Image (cartoon, rainbow, N blue to C red):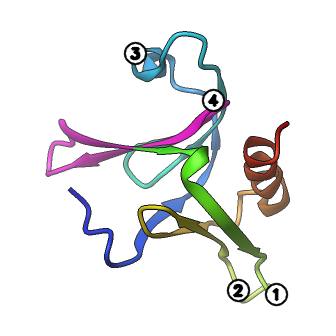
Amino acid sequence: MADMSNILTWTLVSECPIPKDVSELLVEGEVPVAAYKTFRDSAIFTDRRLIVRDAQGLTGKKVEIYSLPYSSIVMWSTENAGNFLDFNAEVELWTKAGHIKINLQRGVDIRKFDRLIANALLKD
């Protein structure tokens, strides 16, 4: 299990199609909204939470799944890449469980990502 006393960090490489096997992780009525490729697996936004699948080991057969309900996020910040030498944008989430940092590689639209979080947290 991740040590939440430190900052948990994920890196998202690019937006990708929603994995077909994500349905086995969803509860009844939960809808996937967007997906992003990580270095070895994927992160999926649903209408209720963020799911990050983290393949581990040499073969990648061992998979750890993080599930972050939007209700546990109390604040977030986004920082876009500064210039052509600054390749990564950053998102920070402050949650009831701890602090999470998400690095977004050049191909990820930081403003779209920010809207995903805002739509998830600020719904009526």
- Is disc 2 surrounded by few (<14), some (14 to 19) or many (20+) residues within 10 Å? few
Ranked by sequence position, the earlier of labels 2 and 4 is: 4
Residue picked out by circle 1: 83
Q: Amino acid at mark 3?
A: Glu
Q: Residue at x 82, y 39 (%)?
A: 123
Residue picked out by circle 2: 86
- Is disc 4 surrounded by few (<14), some (14 to 19) or many (20+) residues within 10 Å? few
Residue picked out by circle 3: 24
Q: Amino acid at mark 4?
A: Pro
Q: Position of residue 86 (x, y in %)?
A: 70, 86
Residue picked out by circle 4: 17
Ranked by sequence position, the earlier of labels 1 and 4 is: 4
Q: Nearer the viewer, mark 2 or mark 3?
A: 3
Q: CA distance from mark 2 to mark 3?
A: 37 Å
Q: Nearer the viewer, mark 1 or mark 3?
A: 3
Q: CA distance from mark 1 to mark 4?
A: 28 Å
From which residue to which does the magenta span run?
43-66
